[in-house]
Image (cartoon, rainbow, N blue to C red):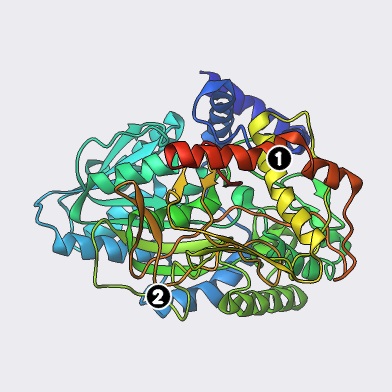
Amino acid sequence: MLVRLLSLARRLLKRLGLLPVIKRILYSGDTAQVAKQTTGWRYRLKTLIEQAIFASVTEVHELPKIQSYWADRYLRPLLERRGYESPDDFFLQNLERVFSQSDQRSLRCASIGSGNCDFEVGLCEALSRRGQNDFVIECIDINQLMLDRGKALAAARGVAGHIATVRADFNAWRPSGQYDVVLANMALHHVVNLEDLFDRVKSSLFPWGRFVVFDIIGRNGHMRWPEALEIVREFWRELPSEYRYNRMLATHQEEYENFDCSRAGFEGIRAQDILPLLLERFHFEEFIGFANVIEPFIDRSTGYNFDPAHPWDRALIDRVQARDHQELLSGRIKPTHMLAVLSPEPTDRADYIDTMTPDFCVRQLMQGNGDRFHFDTSDIQGTFTRINKSESKPGYYRRLGRRLLYLLAAWFPGGAAISLPCDGSFPAPRRTGLGVLHHPAPSLSLPPRNGVEVMDDPSARQQWANGGTEALPGQRAALTAAIEPLEQQAAGEVDVSRQGAAIAAHTVVLDVPAQVAHEVGQHGRPALRAQAT
């Protein structure tokens, strides 16, 4: 009942033209950190908002016409290289492939975040036309109103016997048995508890089962990382004034605003963690990564400002796509979308396009050879901004640690390198479940542009095994959280504020190394760990 009331209120606000105002208020708060929780009143409120948003949405996948132009001209040819006509055909063919290998007479599938079930109903119809009739797809969603629409649609299309609806929060979903296939179509970027969900998906699959995914894997909240944001703003400045109107927020953006969509609800809440966590748990059988810079120009916010019937509009999209493709292949930016087939067991099949492997497509912050902690300051430019001391302690220390890295860079502007021995006794990378990656950082090296990367041997990856670390061939660690300069200046003109020196000399900061050393000596690992968020 409450969801219905919120949905009615949302429709009323939209009719009165006030919905964008409410969205701006919701997006303005700094709630991204508390959003990574699955308990408490904030999580329940965000869940209600999410349900209210979609309760009255009958066309979840409705998109601007300019996106159809882009998809037909660029995405379709990319998929055709792998033998697919569309993302829906990607799911269909891989379902059939699993069905042909299954030992079960009656096949079971689960679809995470199915919404109105229109995608699943379409799959049922296509499978039936191809002679597959002994199967059931469990459609899992938290929104009962959407599931009810799905049941009605399945009955109207004559496939009700193949659809079973399950109302559940996928952050706490418990599989009802074993599955041949688990599907996730544009759902994972709404999930907070990715670790638990992926573990349950893996344990619920038969050995021949597959996890088939189409999702968004860019920066959290559908923001742009700095290297992509730079290019987006470069093209944004070419747009006529009327093209710079954000229809979702009802604001004119003279400069492209890199706002966080996850603040109000769960849109892109942990998108950047999806690919690294899948790499940790599954074996990629097929992977297609695509799009980044093009997205802000064809999405719902500004895509409706473009008309594919106008030559200038098409020409701009073509130029943005060409630059996007070039930067993706170079590795300077990483794809924000992926199609993937994942196996719970090792597989001989590994199909990728060009150099776009799953490992290559992770936006890595750190890479290292495992035996030296190396901090090269030559590529860092930046200064400190003030630290908000009113923050909670964990958030305060995280931000303090990040800024200390840049203080070191500012103290050694000439390109000095700091190396510390690393004997390999550190615990392996692990995730907290709250979107924060704890990492011992055996080696740290800064890339030629923004961000921090671990320069890892591509043939080895640190993993936790029997209380220590173990190098496994063909794998490598990946961190996805940003550590970015807060300001940029020309090389050689880096200033260190007096506040920065005071921070570095603060007793809280000076006590950390001693405390870490003590904990390592006593317990083999520090109680305080380096964090990147």
Looking at this rendering, what residue extends furthest in the top direction? 1
From the top left corner, tell me how far across and down residue 279 is, in percent: 40, 59
Secondary structure, mark 2, is loop
Secondary structure, mark 1, is helix
> Where is mark 1, residue-wise?
510
> Where is mark 2, residue-wise?
352
Mark 1 closeness class: few <14, some 14–19, many ≥20 residues within 10 Å: few
Viewer-closest of 110 and 206: 206
Name the front one of labels 2 and 1.
1
Quarter assignment of residue 397: top right
State which tag comes first along the sequence, 2 or 1: 2
Q: Amino acid at mark 1?
A: Leu
Picture residue at 54% right of the left edge, 24% below the top: 44
Can the viewer see residue 452 in this picture?
A: yes
Quarter assignment of residue 490: bottom right
Task: Give above or below for 180 relative to 492.
Answer: above
Can the viewer see residue 59 in this picture?
A: no
From the top left corner, tell me how far across and down residue 470 is, in percent: 34, 58
Mark 2 closeness class: few <14, some 14–19, many ≥20 residues within 10 Å: some
From the top left corner, tell me how far across and down residue 412 is, in percent: 79, 64
